[in-house]
């Protein structure tokens, strides 16, 4: 596809999203922006959460990592499933019982204001970093495919990327996102299926059964790694990390929980979560199958692209055809924006509720502040993505994303675990100190893990370690419960 054709495709795509936002954003109220008036159908939420959970990072990085990591990522995905069960039957009942708009309000009721603000700030940092990682990857692809041709600087590409999100979310917020995410998830899945169909034809695989046999017979489809406990992909490390990644990055994340809290009641929210958790296993298997076939196609055709460059390079080859290339772009854009748009909305929600406390202001003031914060976080995302462009040059983004989340989400994991598993009170004013020390100590342990633990290399489980250190730190500021 020519750069001009790509621009036309992107323009048409966002025209559809803006049209959706026009109809869903007619009610420009905080209740619609934050909680969609608690009227979202659970099946739409479940389907849309697939795209929000996967994002452009999964779309690019999971297929690109198959060559070196095989199907080992599926071990983490199995952990995800059990993490979602815990969310459905432990965290969601808590959030619905308390009728929360921001889930971090729980920390205020349980421990006090400092814990509440600490949890919210931990989320704001975590989601800003995570959303920026995801958008950074997509902006780099768009820069390569389109904007370099027109000599447009990367900074302008990033500004355009964020501005488009702001354009269709600034009025309707989460109410709009429920519907746009549904459409974007559909585009993403169709894109993967279309690409697999092309690759199957190119690799002389003429039926679904032949594709399945090809996957089973390949050495790249190894799922379970039990041999060496020091291996970052060792099963129990990956599986347990998957459980805790899900609990923190979904269950303790305002972004993902805000969607669940738009359901009419707890029962609908639980149906959404269970359905989503099952479907997600098969969707990730689809992405891994795509990665295996992309790798096979690259080897057969002398293509040297690796990691995050593999899928975009092959998808835009002339011999791929305009239809497959077009669906790749739609899928990439849909995957990226289905995650990023809700991130911008949830950042706005958390900051307004938790930091600014707009609930104590009049209706006109609430709306004014919400819109200002929405613009403010748009600018923050632009600046962070530009910073990433300076820092990161050769990475597989999904693995860097999980590493970063291990440090930023750890304090949240420790705080919520302490609140749910104990009845103890703490000296609230010292919580922020523990929340700084725990990630720092985790980082030091990660750097020196081989020397300290006889060759053991820390992987995704850095999140568990960080949360445990936070939990233990809270024990140090224990305050006897008053009768």
Image (cartoon, helix red, strand yellow):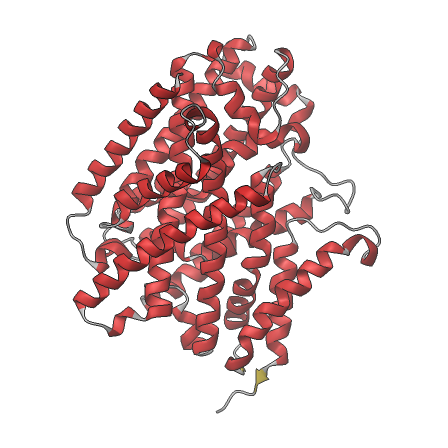
> Relative to residue 137, is residue 433 depicted above or below?
below
Image coordinates for residue 245, horizontal then vertical, percent: 55, 52
Instruction: Specify whether 296 is left or right of 134.
Output: right
Q: Is residue 38 above or below residue 59?
A: below
Name the quadrant containing residue 68.
top right
Q: Is residue 183 above or below residue 168?
A: above
The percent coordinates of residue 52 (x first, y second) are: 41, 43
Left or right side of 329 for 426: right
The image position of residue 469, as x and y in percent, is 65, 67
Q: Position of residue 220 (x, y in %)?
A: 66, 26
Image point (42%, 75%), residue name: 108
**Can residue 78 be seen in the rendering of this structure?**
no
- The residue that appears at 28% across and 59% down in the rendered structure is 372
Q: Residue at point 31% right, 55% down? A: 374
| Residue plotted at (50% across, 44% down) | 133
Name the one closer to the observer, 370 or 227. 370
Question: Is any part of residue 458 visible from this angle?
Answer: yes
Q: In which quadrant will I find the N terminus?
A: top left
């Amino acid at each position: 596809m020519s750069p001009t054709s790509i621009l036309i495709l992107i323009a048409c795509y966002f025209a559809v999203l803006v049209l959706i936002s026009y109809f869903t954003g007619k009610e420009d109220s905080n209740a619609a922006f934050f909680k969609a008036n608690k009227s979202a159908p659970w099946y739409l939420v479940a389907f849309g959460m697939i795209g929000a959970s996967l994002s452009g990072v999964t779309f690019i990085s999971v297929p690109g990592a198959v060559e070196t990591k095989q199907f080992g990522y599926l071990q983490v995905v199995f952990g995800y499933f059990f993490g979602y069960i815990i969310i459905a039957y432990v965290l969601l009942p808590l959030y619905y019982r308390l009728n929360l708009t921001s889930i971090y309000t729980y920390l205020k009721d349980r421990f006090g204001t400092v814990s509440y603000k600490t949890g919210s700030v931990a989320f704001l940092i975590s989601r800003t970093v995570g959303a920026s990682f995801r958008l950074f990857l997509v902006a780099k692809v768009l820069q390569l495919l389109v904007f370099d041709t027109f000599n447009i600087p990367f900074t302008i590409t990033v500004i355009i990327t964020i501005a488009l999100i702001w354009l269709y979310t600034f009025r309707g917020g989460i109410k709009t996102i429920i519907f746009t995410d549904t459409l974007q998830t559909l585009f993403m899945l169709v894109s993967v299926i279309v690409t697999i169909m092309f690759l199957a034809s190119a690799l002389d695989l003429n039926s679904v059964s032949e594709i399945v046999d090809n996957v089973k017979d390949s050495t790249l489809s190894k799922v379970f790694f039990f041999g060496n406990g020091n291996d970052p992909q060792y099963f129990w490390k990956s599986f347990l990390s998957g459980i805790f990644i899900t609990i923190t990055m979904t269950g303790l994340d305002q972004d993902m929980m805000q969607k669940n809290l738009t359901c009419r009641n707890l029962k609908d929210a639980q149906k959404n979560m269970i359905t989503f958790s099952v479907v997600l296993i098969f969707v990730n298997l689809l992405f891994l199958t795509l990665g295996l076939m992309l790798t096979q196609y690259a080897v057969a055709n002398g293509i040297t692209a690796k990691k995050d460059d593999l899928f975009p390079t092959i998808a835009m080859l002339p011999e791929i055809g305009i239809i497959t290339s077009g669906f790749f772009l739609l899928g990439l854009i849909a995957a990226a924006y289905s995650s990023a748009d809700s991130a911008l909305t949830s950042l706005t929600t958390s900051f307004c509720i938790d930091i600014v406390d707009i609930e104590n202001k009049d209706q006109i003031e609430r709306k004014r502040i919400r819109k200002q914060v929405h613009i403010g976080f748009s600018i923050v995302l632009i600046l962070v993505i530009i910073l990433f462009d300076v820092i990161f040059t050769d990475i597989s983004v999904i693995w860097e994303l999980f590493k970063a989340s291990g440090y930023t989400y750890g304090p949240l994991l420790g705080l919520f675990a302490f609140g749910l598993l104990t009845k103890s009170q703490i000296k609230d004013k010292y919580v922020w100190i523990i929340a700084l020390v725990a990630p720092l100590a985790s980082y030091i342990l990660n750097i020196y893990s081989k020397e300290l633990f006889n060759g053991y290399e820390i992987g995704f489980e850095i999140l568990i370690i960080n949360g445990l250190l936070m939990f233990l730190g809270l024990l140090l500021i224990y305050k006897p419960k008053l009768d």
